[in-house]
Amino acid sequence: MESVFYMKMKAAMFHGPKNVVLEETPIPEISDDEVLVKIKASTTCGTDRKLYLRPGKKYPSYFKPPTIFGHEIAGEIYQIGKNVEGYEIGQPVYVHDSAPCLKCFYCKIGRHSLCENITWSWGTWTEFIKVPKEIIQSGNMVPIPKNLSFAEAALTEPLSCVLMGVERSNIGLGDTVVIMGAGPIGLFWTNLVKNKGAKIIQVDLKKERLELAKKLGADIVINADKEKDIIKAVKDHTDEGRGADVAVEAIGYPQTWETTIKMARKGGLVNLFGGPPPTSDISINTALLHYNELTLIGVFHTTPRYVQASINLLANKKINTDIFISEELKLDDLDKILDNLVNQKGIKTAIIP
Ligand SMILES: [Zn+2]
Ligand SMILES: [Zn+2]
């Protein structure tokens, strides 16, 4: 086996908000239960943007600066620990950013996204990544079908989160679904809800993003900047103005959560999908829950089942990947990558190290 331990790799290192620097760092060493993957593509994500811009020092427990940035990747297996079976050197794989423990109460009842001991694997804006054994054992390192590029396969992480959100929303054929937000996550919603045969009303502040929503199949697009009463504007596009069967918030602000709740019809379902800061609160008129019998749900992250299903969807060409990968850049173009991320230029940048 070729030794890489003496070598260094290029990495975009996160030191704090607005402080990501291209550095050299040692290539990780793997144990007998791990795999080393040579990264072929990493895609940028709204979560990266939040971390990059968030002032203060409160990060998720698994994110400890200085640390390599990014979490969506696909690559090729470069080294295999001697206890790992079923993979081969050079094999293209998608590596998910997390794995459930498969042992705790929540894993046992099938609620893997609520796992008490999730293993996270971040640090993808670089050349190599060490894949922890939990990710291999949970099936979250998945061989990539031949008809997918590495950048397309890297989309699996956000897609799998949205797929779980869609599957939990009970969308029926012929339903009207309002999607608040047309960023990367909102647009994955559009793509998947279209596959469900529903009418889509999409709301955003950016004209370019609403145009992409139309390309992905949104039936009505509404620019929130141009409306005095956004709730009425949405309801006016639903049958008898009664509101949407399913209302989805794909932005992550408490205020838009509250607005989205008011867009659903009586007996409708509201999926509060975008993640606001954990300390925030919302208020809801009690009548909406009691007399209107609204169902409110929250959905966090994803599970191995939806990771595999997302790879299948991508391989079956059900996702319009061209729209999601707006640009491919080298790791050396870090300034441009960060500029795209911060200023929301395009949807996602694929970083090809
Ligand atoms: Zn992501
Ligand atoms: Zn667990």
Image (cartoon, grey):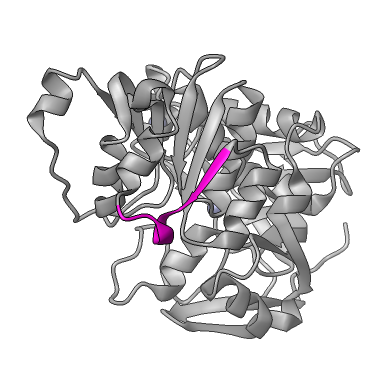
Q: Is residue 24 above or below residue 176?
A: below
Quarter holding the N terminus?
bottom right
Q: Quadrant of the C terminus?
A: bottom right
Query: What is the count of numbered marks?
Result: 0
Image quarter of residue 348: bottom right
Image point 85% across, 48% down: which residue?
149
The residue range painted magenta reads 220-228
Q: Along the line of sight, which residue is nearer the eye, 315 or 258? A: 258
Residue at x 76% of width, y 59% of height: 41
Q: Residue placed at 19% from the left, 54% from the top? A: 280
Is residue 311 found left or right of 271 in the rendered image? right
Q: Quadrant of residue 300?
A: top left
* Ligand 2 rendered quadrant: top left
Q: Is residue 232 magenta?
A: no
Magenta residue check for 227:
yes
Task: Pick the residue in front: 157 or 39.
Answer: 157
| Residue 157 coordinates in the image, percent (x, y) | 60, 45
Q: Is residue 207 visible?
A: yes
Direction from residue 313 to residue 289 in the image, left or right:
left
In the rendered view, would you say 349 is above or below 281?
Answer: below
Q: Is residue 74 visible?
A: no
Give left or right: position of 242 versus 85: left
Q: Please provide percent x and percent y for residue 283.
A: 13, 43
- Return the x and y of residue 8 as percentages of the image width and height: 73, 78
Left or right: where does residue 15 sit relative to residue 287? Answer: right
Q: Nearer the viewer, residue 233 or 289?
A: 233
Residue found 57% across the figure and 71% down from its top: 341
Q: Is residue 117 above or below residue 75?
A: above
Q: Position of residue 324 (x, y in %)?
A: 69, 52
